[in-house]
Image (spheres, grey):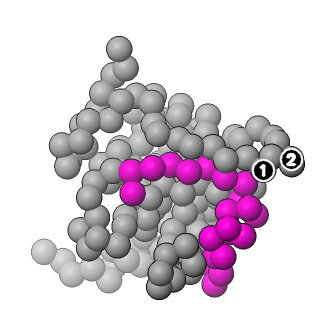
Amino acid sequence: MPKKQTNNAGLQMARLLPIARCPDPNKPRECGAIPVITRLHQEDRLAHFIEVFGRPSPDGLGDCHEVSLALMVDLIVAGCSDGWQWITGTHRMHRPPLLHSWLEFDGWAIDVANGKILVMEAAMYRSVTQAHGLTRRDAEQTRDHVETLLLAAPRG
């Protein structure tokens, strides 16, 4: 029986994450992102991600920013962030187009929004979603961004 974890919203998560992989049918290749995420999850090293993954969105617009950043932070803490990027950009899959967040690693997009994990060839993902105005942050840039947010937050 898979071990279960409970996040703060009281949701139980089986040891297996709900990952949907969508490779390019014309150029199939291995995806290195899935084994990293799966291994860290099995080792209980995705604490920030598990805390926010699958929770209802407070504003009803989705949780992509919180969940993507949480996964990137866990990758950094685990020492597994080399080659990973946290991406934000306008995503035209929504009407009206909204700012969206996801991760990319080794040419794969990892979209961890709304209780689902979609892994797709990054070029295909950006084409399908018509993503534009992208900001890419590697581990160091993500740490700097988080520090800036924390410094701007009110103390209390």
Residue 24 — which label? 1
Disc 2 crowd, CA 10 A, few/some/many (<14, 14-19, 20+): few
Identify the mark at residue 27; answer none if there is no mark.
Answer: 2
Amino acid type for the residue under numbered disc 2? Lys
Q: Which residues are magenta?
A: 114-135
Q: Examine the structure image and report whether residue 121 is included in the region drawn in magenta.
A: yes
> Eyeballing the image, is 42 above or below 73?
above
Mark 2 and mark 1: Cα distance apart in space: 5 Å
Which residue lies at the image location 26% right of the left edge and 73% below the top edge?
59
Q: Which mark is residue 107?
A: none
Locate the C terminus and report the quarter of the image it occupies.
Answer: bottom left
* Residue at the image position 20 percent from the left and 49 percent from the top: 9
Is 146 rendered above or below residue 114? below
Question: Do labels 2 and 1 touch, CB within 8 Å?
Answer: yes
Percent position of residue 51, x then y: 30, 49
The answer, for residue 82, to whether it is visible in the render is no
